[in-house]
Image (cartoon, helix red, strand yellow):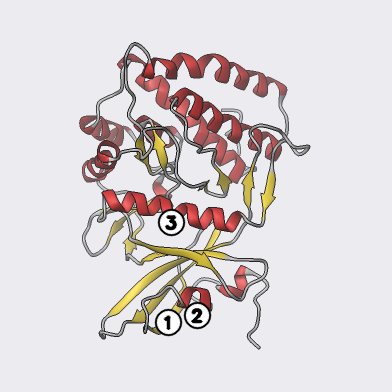
Amino acid sequence: MAKTHSSVKEVIPEIGGKFALDKGVVEVLPPGSQIIEASSFGTSAWTRTARIAIKVPNGSFEQYFLKVQLCLVTKTDTKKLNADNGMQCATEGGEIMMKGECVSMTELHKLAPSFVPRPQTWGKFHLASPVTHFFLCEFIDMEIKMPDPVSFCARLAGIHLSSQSPTGQFGFSVPNCHGKILQSNDWDPSWTSFFTKLLVSFFRIEIGVNGPWPEYQQAFEVIVTTVVPQLLDPLQADGRILKPSLVHGDLWDGNVAINKSTGEPVVFDASAFYAHNEYELGTWRRKGTGFGKAHFDEYLRNVGPSEPVEQWDDRVRLYSLKFNLAHMIGWPAAPFVREE
């Protein structure tokens, strides 16, 4: 009888370790493939990752990148807070995380195939307990460094400009995660309403993780009730139409690289949805993300600010709050972020 693994660390060992592929992964590789090697590769905060080398029936060789859930998904019920301030973990979260990333990467790859690794599929291991899910995509040999702002921002802007929401609304077709955090991404015709629900859901989780702070919570209430509508309502007022654009959703220097073969920029680890395109820039306002003035300038050369133009900087600053909350949830011990 085949052994059932009891943890992801048994499924994929430490960096550089070789392992036998679970049948659930083998079944989604090209039929008739010969497994040359499967070995752990790279690092990830919430998952375990590996590289798979195979020989396909025509004699050529292919490589794939495998990502396996390592943690449970943090989520909140935005309609009703639980006794733990809305924070809970779900064993079904692996499916949400892996499927959500697969669909996110698929939608982005359709629009920019040289910018986004080609997704293969997502699935479930046969021999793992608790239930373990995975995401599989093409393997690209990358150099982890910031790409040239000109080429990077042109490709990113191309996605924002060419994408079309299938419903004409803000949201996404499946639940997905920002890191390990379940995003509120139900379809909504109002960007103000959509962003408010997203921001509130992350704030509730952050309070559950780091504890209450009355002054902080009062300030957040002002932001939600006053600042958000003041800055976002005008985007869809006075006859203005705000196009929902497909965004990567988590663009910091840990999720961008250079394709060693082509020298072109590559992005990965997407948590996509259809948003106001300027939302994408919110994470660039955070300290230590690798993005700076050159990236803002190049992006704005490709896509001008939405009207009202004079509120552009305030809107991007507002969007950065969501990414700060995500950081505080993922790394509760990070110094000074809450205070800032």
Measuring from the top left, give residue 48's x and y in whole percent.
53, 64
Q: Which residue is mark 3?
A: 102
Q: Which residue is mark 1?
A: 37
- Comparing marks 2 and 3, which lies closer to the viewer? 3
Which of the image's four quarters has the C terminus?
top right
Position above or below: 167 against 69 = above
The numbered mark, 1 or 3, whose residue comes first in the sequence reads 1
Amino acid marked by disc 3: Cys
Drawn side of residue 171 relative to residue 299, left or right:
right
Query: Which label is found at residue 20?
Result: none
Measuring from the top left, give residue 19's x and y in whole percent.
52, 80
User: Are the residues flagged by discs 2 and 1 in contact, CB closer than 8 Å?
Assistant: yes
Measuring from the top left, give residue 7's x and y in whole percent.
65, 70
Q: Which residue is mark 2?
A: 18
The numbered mark, 2 or 3, whose residue comes first in the sequence reads 2
Graded by Cα atoms within 10 Å as few (under 14), some (14 to 19) or many (20 or more), the crowding at tag 1 reads some
* Residue 291 in sight: no
Drawn side of residue 51 relative to residue 160, left or right:
right
Position above or below: 204 against 40 = above
Drawn side of residue 102 relative to residue 151, left or right:
right
Give the Cα distance between marks 2 and 1: 7 Å
